[in-house]
Image (cartoon, helix red, strand yellow):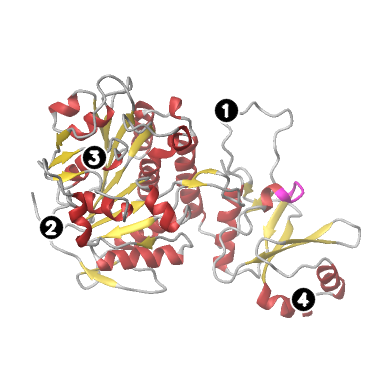
Amino acid sequence: MLDHLVDRAANAVEIVPLRAARLEDWLKRQPAATAQWARASGFTAKPGSVCLVPDESGGLSRVLVGLEEGTDRWSMAGLPGFLPKGAYRIADTASPSDAQAGAFAWALGGYRFRRYKKPADKPEELAKLVWPAEVDRESVERMVAAISLARDLINTPAEDMGPAELADAAKAVARKFKAKFSVIAGDDLLKKNYATIHTVGRASNRPPRLIDLSWGSSGPRLVLVGKGVCFDSGGLDLKPSSGMLMMKKDMGGAALMLALAQAIMAAGLKIRLRLLIPAVDNAVSGNAFRPWDVIRTRKGISVEVGNTDAEGRLILCDALAEAHKDGPDLIIDAATLTGAARVALGPELPALFCNDDDIAEALLRHGRAEDDPFWRLPLHKGYRRMLDSKVADINNVSDGGFAGAITAALYLQEFIDPGVRWAHIDTYAWNPRERPGRPEGGEALCLRALYAFVESWSRPKKGGRAVIAPKAAPRKIRQRTRRRR
């Protein structure tokens, strides 16, 4: 996967990362021919711009690349496919953070989803980068592997990525890291009181499943829950064809949480981890669930089905109830849950809802530090009335078109016990446009931020308090005593 990064290479061409504010100072210290060439080429160090500097014989002497201010993780991602084939190295003058970011960008610049493509007569040959000496190579490899896993799962068509295949993918990760793994499938979901997962998935000829992975024996208890709707037709409240077109990505929350779990285990973090993925197809057949049906959930809350196309929150609510089993210190769920979040924030900003201000602020800080941001939306309790039902404890949709992302989060909050810290991420899980290192298709939005948060949160306590903020902006919270249930 990373064969376009190499340990060593003879005569590797130097890549010099530059920022616009310091370009002129750098040029003044260079040979006159280099400075003249860069200026004549119109190179201004605009992020992502490239200047190929020739040597006296007409060969390639140097590559100048423009970076954004701060940590730029993407401007070098276009280089593997753009530069002439051969070996390159990042200049020794680059800061350790620029070298780390550059290696990450180069690695993801080689990502391709080619499962369904014929082998090319002449395979693409990417330019190779020599691993910089100061780079934390394991960190880069771990994150690139996790992002690639999530992208591959999301990009795979629903025909080849149903509940069983999603379970197989999770099982493969569990085996790699010797995690405990189990699956409850089909009618066994009813026997074991996961009624909403069964109800949503029963109309498909591919039985629904609850995927369960556990790992780790020390540290805080973290439960990850991911929405695994492998294809969403909308059910009897059928989507139009335009709305159904991209629904292979409706398991993007599950892909994100599985990728995060893989990264946590690969790093050996001191975490007692549990991953729960309710995996279903929301299909149409004679036994599909209907509008105004009432379902008794695992938590005992009765839910009136206001719309069968709001199925993600139904399967999540049983998984969230199960997530409380061992007294977690934190629950994080992720889902491609609402179009309302996309209308409000667009495709690049996952919406964050959280019932703990310290956790929320730490997640936001890590998102900024990793250039992998969230945007927090409120759990405004005044909107809870929009979910009232005349025949059940709650409706799965609101009584109008307002605040759809917030009311969906409020629905999920009903299944979180008081005092349990919880974060909910409403993500798009997709790149709608092509950019270097981020091809159009499935995407693990906020994965880097989530991992950085968990890595910090898992560190040994200092003075009885758990560190949860990045080094650049330290912040601590009191670790609450876990209650047994």
Find numbered disc 4 in the image and state the secondary structure of the residue it sits on: helix
Are the residues at dot 3 and dot 1 in contact (C-beta closer than 8 Å)?
A: no
Q: Residue at x 42, y 73 (%)?
A: 472
Q: Whole-Å distance between the Cαs marked 2 and 3?
A: 26 Å
Which of the two labelled residues, at mark 2 and mark 3, occupies the earlier sequence position? Answer: 3
Q: Nearer the viewer, mark 3 or mark 1?
A: 3
Residue 172 falls in which quadrant of the image? top left
Residue 329 visible in the displayed image: no
Disc 1 or disc 4, which is closer to the eye? 1
From the image, state whether disc 2 or disc 3 is nearer to you: 3
Picture disc at residue 306: 3
In magenta, the rendered stretch is 82-86
Between discs 3 and 1, the one toward the N terminus: 1
- Please state which of residues 467 and 317 is positioned toward the viewer in this rendering: 317
Counting from the top left corner in percent of width and height, residue 39 is at 82, 71
Q: Foreground residue, 8 or 309?
A: 309
What amino acid type is highlighted by mark number 1?
A: Tyr
Q: Position of residue 226 (x, y in %)?
A: 32, 43
Q: Which mark is residue 116?
A: 1
- First reached walking from the N terminus: tag 1 or tag 2: 1
